[in-house]
Image (cartoon, rainbow, N blue to C red):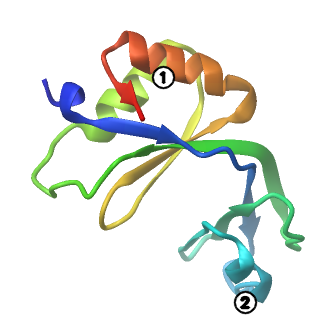
Amino acid sequence: MMKATLKLTVSPDNYSIHRLDPASPIPENVLQSGTYFIGKTDEELSIVCDSDLPIDSTNSVSGWSYIKVMGPLDFNLQGVLSGISGILADAGISICAISTFDTDYVFVRISDLDKAESALEKAGYEFV
């Protein structure tokens, strides 16, 4: 199975997910975050960054960390996020998934991180 070949790692950092008005400029201090993600649509500007960075957002949720699929992943792989998210959904864990060119990041609440790791290990995923 594909999951046996996938290796996962966990970030020890604390992240916040922010929502801003789509017309808002991207706050410059976001670039100070070691890891950050920016997504913009007609409806919103979303930013994921270190929780200790002050971001003037219309809404935010703090206390997230991520499980990273070690990459780079081949674009022909199928079901990577589906497999992980399904296991976490069955365990009652909410996620925020973000994909990059090389890999996938599955954000989970820090309070659910141990439970998420346990569920994924039980399903055959390996953490490194």
Mark 2 = which residue? 25
Identify whether 77 is placed above or below 95.
below
Q: Left of 98 or right of it: where is 25?
A: right
For image coordinates 31% across by 33% down, the residue present is 82
Could you tell which of marks 1 and 2 lies nearer the N-terminus?
A: 2
Q: Nearer the viewer, residue 54 or 45?
A: 54
Q: Position of residue 45 (x, y in %)?
A: 65, 73
Q: Position of residue 48 (x, y in %)?
A: 66, 62
Q: Left of 75 or right of it: where is 47?
A: right
Q: Position of residue 77 (x, y in %)?
A: 14, 46
Q: Position of residue 55 (x, y in %)?
A: 85, 72
Which residue type carries mark 1?
Answer: Leu
Which residue type carries mark 2?
Answer: Pro
Q: Nearer the viewer, residue 20 or 32?
A: 32
- Check contact, mark 1 vs mark 2: CB within 8 A: no
Mark 1 = which residue? 88
Q: Label 1's element?
A: helix
Q: Check disc 2: other Cα within 10 Å, few if <14, some if 14-19, many if 20+.
A: few
In three-dimensional space, the C-alpha distance between marks 1 and 2, rounded to whole angstroms, equals: 34 Å
Q: Left of 68 or right of it: where is 39?
A: right
For image coordinates 74% across by 85% down, the residue present is 24
Identify whether 55 is placed above or below 15.
below
Q: Left of 101 or right of it: where is 56?
A: right
* Tag count: 2
For image coordinates 29% across by 54% down, the residue present is 71
Q: Label 2's element?
A: loop
